[in-house]
Amino acid sequence: MHALVTGANGHLGFNLVAMLRAKGHEVRASVRSVSDAEKTKRLRAIPGVELVEADVRNEEQMLAALAGVDTLFHVAAVYSTTEKGRDTEILESAVRGAEIALRAASRSGVRRVILTSSVVTLPLTQRGAPPSTEDDWATDLRIPYFRAKVESEKLAWAVAGELGIELTTILPAGIIGPGFSRATPTIDLIRACLMGEFRLGAPRGNFSFVDVRDVAAAHLLAFETGETGRFIVGYDHVPSYSELVRTLGRVDPTVRPALLTLPTLAAPFLPLYDALSHRVFGTPRIATPEIIATLVSGKVVNYSCERAKTRLGWSAGIAFEQSLKDTVAELTRIH
């Protein structure tokens, strides 16, 4: 395989490039700017990687990056949920980026595309309800990143059908584990827990996770099996926020369990508390009114990975606690 990996300097992109090279595949890694030495030094350290500059919103750059390639791993995305003023960038990078990537792939003769989507494209469910599957789509899109993921994946499927592209989409849970150079919103949640944001109380609700190495493996399995369609990948058990803090306490004994689970009536005040914690203790911002209204709503994250297990032969190979331990070690390294 001769593959192009977009967003190669991101958490998943970097791990996927490293895995593909370890398996002996030819890899071209695209980033927005090859002149940014800080963002490209890790990729340059992987033997045999061809580094190219390509903004996924620039069709000419994408065409050049895809020349001679037979498989596109479209990983690039702007993953941001609390930064102000980035809504347009988030949507444009996802939606326009997906369309340009697929159309450029078709023009370049690339017929196989594996695109990274997210479990945020799936609806939350009532407690005790059957899990969401790949046949379901989220309709609560008040969080711009959630909207971007839903709209870009739906558009990708429409364009792939129009152009005859073999498309697979991987829907990972919140990605943790080693190999990141800066924190994502998922990593910021872990960091906030480590810094004691939930020391007085954890919100109701839950948050899904998966190790980055297992997500990279799912992308490789999609290529190796030739399977097309949507595939959810994540830990079968989705921990509550209180469980997350307790598990982190086993990794780092300085992390104390939350004193209580906050009642749902407290949810509207959580963004204010989050802002205060950020100002006083320097914790990362993890809550906005839209995030709280969506994720602390009485519904829960509830999905099934059965399709990935049966059709891709995928399973989570890194235990949750080990992945958290590796995440904490990486945070220690970069901070």
Image (spheres, rainbow, N blue to C red):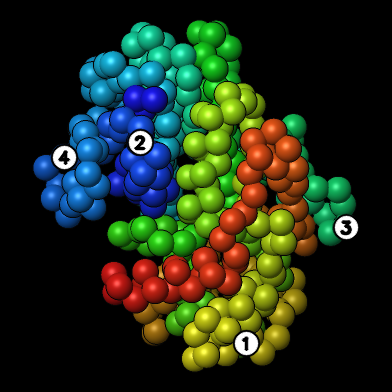
Q: Earlier in the sequence, mark 1 or mark 4?
A: 4
Q: Earlier in the sequence, mark 1 or mark 2?
A: 2
Q: Is 60 located above or below residue 247 in the figure?
A: above
Q: Position of residue 267 (x, y in %)?
A: 66, 70
Q: Earlier in the sequence, mark 3 or mark 4?
A: 4
Residue underneath mark 1: 257
Q: Earlier in the sequence, mark 3 or mark 2?
A: 2
Residue 34 is tagged as 4
Report the quarter where the C terminus lies: bottom left
Q: Position of residue 74 (x, y in %)?
A: 42, 32
Specify the quadrant of the image occupied by residue 30: top left
Q: Position of residue 273 (x, y in %)?
A: 53, 77
Q: Earlier in the sequence, mark 2 or mark 4?
A: 2
Q: Which callout, 2 or 4, points to the residue nearer the camera?
A: 2
Q: Is 145 located above or below residue 245 in the figure?
A: above
3D distance between C-alphas at marks 3 and 2: 45 Å
Residue underneath mark 2: 24
Q: Are marks 1 and 2 in contact (CB under 8 Å)?
A: no
Label 4: few (<14), some or many (≥20) within 10 Å?
Answer: some
Residue 122 is tagged as none
Amino acid carrying mark 2 in the image: Gly
Label 1: few (<14), some or many (≥20) within 10 Å?
Answer: many
Q: Is residue 231 left or right of residue 61?
A: right
Q: Residue placed at 50% from the left, 8% from the top?
A: 163
Residue underneath mark 3: 128
